[in-house]
Image (spheres, rainbow, N blue to C red):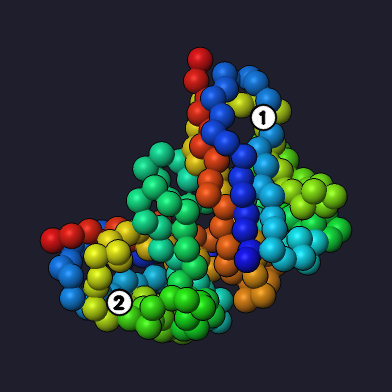
């Protein structure tokens, strides 16, 4: 069974750094792109970027380029999303999702809620 | 950049109703369109890909259609578990994903 399990909720202060994770199982992790999607409170879905674990090829949405970093550790089948300096506007639910053979996002993690507040 | 719009932004319907949601792209997208359902407090779920192909496990009351710039998601007979927000999404060959703003379906 394909599963993506994300790390738990985080509460941080503005200016702090953060790295959240997404662990894949039940499939060959290196063979499928992993995307990150943001959902701000009460708002819609926004694609942030995508990484191919096989060679770490990464694509970012222009709106998020330079704001976040996406990476992987294939030894533990885990993808990461990280910030070097959080802002209050980063408060949101973040989802990881696998890009399946059809090109769409066929399996999703449960989401990680990030709250940034002083 | 391709922009996606959806209509309506929300609708109220009753169990058993036929519901249609429309998604429009700012230019032709060659059926590179998916539909997702997001129930309150849950992660999104893929319903339809390639504009009209039903994802495995999705009930047959869901269907997708369209071409060019205009696409629709139809729920033939609304069930209680279908009250949710629905998003269309364009996916490009260069791995760019663009979501529509969503359509919230709630109980009349």
The crowding category of the residue bearing disc 2, from other C-alpha atoms within 10 Å (few below 14, some 14 to 19, many at least 20), is many
Give x and y (percent) for residue A72: 78, 48
- Left or right: where A114 falls relative to A103: left
- In this rendering, is residue B82 above or below A93? below
Q: Quadrant of the N terminus of chain A?
A: bottom right
Secondary structure category for the residue under label 1: strand
Decide if residue A69 is on the left or right side of residue B33: right
Question: What chain does mark 1 sit on?
Answer: A
Residue B16 in view, yes or no: yes
Q: Is disc 2 in the same subunit as disc 1?
A: no
Question: Which residue, given by chain and number where applicable, does mark 2 sit on?
Answer: B75
Kindly identify which residue carries mark 1. Answer: A18
At horizontal 30% and vertical 64% (from top left) the residue drawn is B81
Residue neighbourhood size for the residue with mark 1, other residues' Cα within 10 Å, grouped as few (<14), some (14–19), many (≥20): some
Q: Nearer the viewer, residue B102 or A78?
A: A78
Tell me how many marks there are: 2
Q: Residue at x 84, y 61 (%)?
A: A54
The residue positioned 57% from the left and 67% from the top of the image is A106
Residue at mark 2 to residue at mark 1: CA–CA distance? 41 Å
Q: Disc 2 on helix, strand or loop?
A: strand
State which chain disc 2 sits on: B
Left or right: residue B17 versus residue A44 is left
For residue A13, above or below residue A42:
above
Q: Is residue A57 visible?
A: no
Q: Residue at left 69%, top 63%?
A: A26
x and y percentages locating residue B20 in the rendered image? 28, 75
Residue B9, above or below A87:
below
Q: Return the residue nearer the eye: B100 or B81.
A: B81
Residue A69 lies, in percent from the top left, at: 73, 40
Q: Could you tell me if the residues under marks 2 and 1 are in contact, i.e. CB atoms within 8 Å?
A: no
Please provide percent x and percent y for residue A58. Answer: 76, 54
């Amino acid at each position: 069974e394909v599963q993506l399990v994300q790390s738990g909720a985080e509460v941080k202060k503005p200016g702090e750094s953060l790295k959240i994770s997404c662990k894949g199982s039940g499939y060959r992790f290196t063979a499928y792109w992993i995307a990150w999607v943001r959902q701000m409170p009460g708002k819609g879905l926004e694609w942030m970027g995508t990484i191919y674990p096989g060679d770490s090829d990464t694509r970012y949405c222009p709106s998020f380029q330079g704001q976040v970093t996406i990476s992987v550790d294939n030894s533990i089948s885990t993808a990461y999303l990280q910030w070097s300096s959080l802002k209050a506007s980063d408060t949101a639910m973040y989802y990881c999702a696998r890009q399946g053979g059809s090109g769409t996002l066929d399996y999703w993690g449960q989401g990680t809620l990030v709250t940034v507040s002083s | 950049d391709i922009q996606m719009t959806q209509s309506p932004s929300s609708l109220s319907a009753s169990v058993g109703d036929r519901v249609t949601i429309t998604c429009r792209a700012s230019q032709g997208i060659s059926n590179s369109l998916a539909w997702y359902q997001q129930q309150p407090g849950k992660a999104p779920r893929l319903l339809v890909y390639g504009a009209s192909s039903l994802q495995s496990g999705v009930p047959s009351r869901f269907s997708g259609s369209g071409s060019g710039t205009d696409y629709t998601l139809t729920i033939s007979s609304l069930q209680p578990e279908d009250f949710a927000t629905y998003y269309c999404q364009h996916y490009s060959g260069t791995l760019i994903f663009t979501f529509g703003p969503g359509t919230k379906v709630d109980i009349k």
